[in-house]
Amino acid sequence: MKTKIVKSNGISGTIRLAGDKSISHRAALFAALATGQSSIENFLDAGVTRVLLNNLTKLGVTWQMAGNTLTVEGNGIGGLKEPTDVLFCGNSATTLRLLAGVIAAAGLDATLDGSDGLRKRPMKRIIEPLHSMGVPLKGSDSNTAPLKFQKRSLFDPLEGQNISLNVASAQVKTCVLLAGLGANTPIIVNEPAQSRDHTERLLKLIGAAITVDEANHSIRLIIPDEIMLNPLDLTIPGDISSAAFLIVAALIIPNSSLRIENVGLNPTRTGLLDVLIEMGGQISILDERVENNEPVGTIEVRSSELVGIEIDGDTIVRMIDEFPIFAIAAVCSEGKTTVRDATELRYKETDRISVLSGELLNLGVDIEEKPGGFIIEGGKGISGGECNGHGDHRLAMSLSILGTVSEQPIIVKGTGIIKESFPNFFELLTSLGVDSINLYE
Ligand code: S3P
């Protein structure tokens, strides 16, 4: 599918968003590992979470979606069944890397695989620590999916380790911590910078013995003789990474005013908000509170005159998913924006530095690709044209938002992929005052 997006005269409204993608993944998975029935409200029902749920079915877990409430019957880690079929993870690296930790802990004979895109994502980062714990696992010759796990007796527990990750990745951290549930000694994970900490918060909520040394980005998980995780009863906050597209839209489209309620405000995820405020964005945070161990609140945004900025260091990991839409904010800002230290972007759904630079360059943006980021000279206006989302949901949404401020319409090819994480993206934009027309390729 391709979509034509027309210049908007302003967006306004009050909205709530579907549940955070990272928390939805973890909530479904931890509910499957708990003992008893879990109820999860505002669960993100999208492509990436459906692949996880289908795999839970293959592992013998029963679940039900009614509206946006997910109920899961958990039978503990030992209650998981050996799958008779490949655990197919589609485009979702989160599903694959998190499930890898669970399969490792449960000692199951299983194969994890995914789409051609997912088969290109690096898996050495989980294979190595899992090997060090004694997990019998093999990836492809280039250390990618499919990942084949051999059966391991639960009388032969994994070895807890003190593992130092060389990349700040919440997926890797979570994989290792989940594998740690099958170890007989504590597992300690040290990160080079703090990645999103939803796993730690949720594990604490369901009774795991986990301690976090925030200053040193170090997490210690101790497994009691018998692991018994409590079921969950929670509401997932709206996804801050989905809100990001609408926040930038409200900032760059003149005459806009937007209120997003019940959105997640976990500080490991709010790097983009801090950066946009520093660029001159009129963004207010209201009604801040903690629900189910996660910070939540309301974000109000008004059209703003933005100026360019330099970003590097620890801020990168706090906004790792937001660079495609951040680049659109930079295009609409006066002056130069520089991004450094962001090589990790090359290992996302696409090589986001290269693909983003290529697409923006084609649309006439003054952008220069760098090994670890990019430089954009903003404030020069956009005339319109055709571009491609390259099978990357966040790139397709970001290019669509650029269409809302472009003199002539922008046509984005490959917008079908957006349903992987934000199924009602265009519907919501339309309700706020953006015209978009779906054209079939
Ligand atoms: C995620 C972690 C991040 C992020 C992804 C979701 C998670 O990936 O990009 O969208 O839910 O743990 P990395 O761990 O690879 O940085």
Image: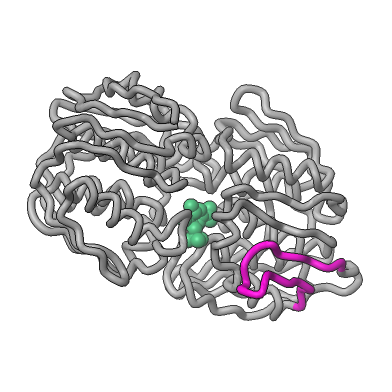
Which sits in the foreground, 244 or 392? 392
Give me the residue at 19% from left, 58% from top. Answer: 367
Give me the residue at 62% from left, 47% from top. Answer: 90
Give me the residue at 23% from left, 38% from top. Answer: 385
Residue stretch rendered in magenta on the structure: 134-151
Give me the residue at 52% from left, 39% from top. Answer: 420
Query: In this picture, is 162 found above or below 54?
Result: below
Instruction: Say whether residue 404 is visible.
Output: yes
Q: In the image as oriented, which residue stretches furthest toward the front?
A: 441
In the rendered structure, the answer to whether residue 27 lies left or right of residue 338 reads: right
* Number of numbered discs on residues: 0
Which sits in the foreground, 361 or 419? 361
In the rendered structure, the answer to whether residue 139 lies left or right of residue 121 reads: right
Is 376 one of the magenta-colored residues? no
> Quadrant where the C terminus lies?
top left
> Quadrant where the N terminus lies?
top left
Report which quarter residue 255 is drawn in: top left
Report which quarter residue 297 is drawn in: top left
Query: In this picture, is 30 found above or below 414?
Result: below
Query: In this picture, is 80 found above or below 171?
Result: above
In the rendered structure, the answer to whether residue 303 lies left or right of residue 201 reads: left
Pinpoint residue 359: horizontal percent, then vertical percent: 29, 50
Pinpoint residue 77: horizontal percent, then vertical percent: 80, 55
Which sits in the foreground, 341 or 14? 341
Report which quarter residue 17 is drawn in: top left
Q: Main secondary structure of the magenta part?
A: loop
Is 150 one of the magenta-colored residues? yes
Pinpoint residue 224: horizontal percent, then vertical percent: 78, 66
Instruction: Say whether residue 296 is visible.
Output: no
In this picture the colour scheme is: one colour
Pinpoint residue 347: horizontal percent, then vertical percent: 46, 63
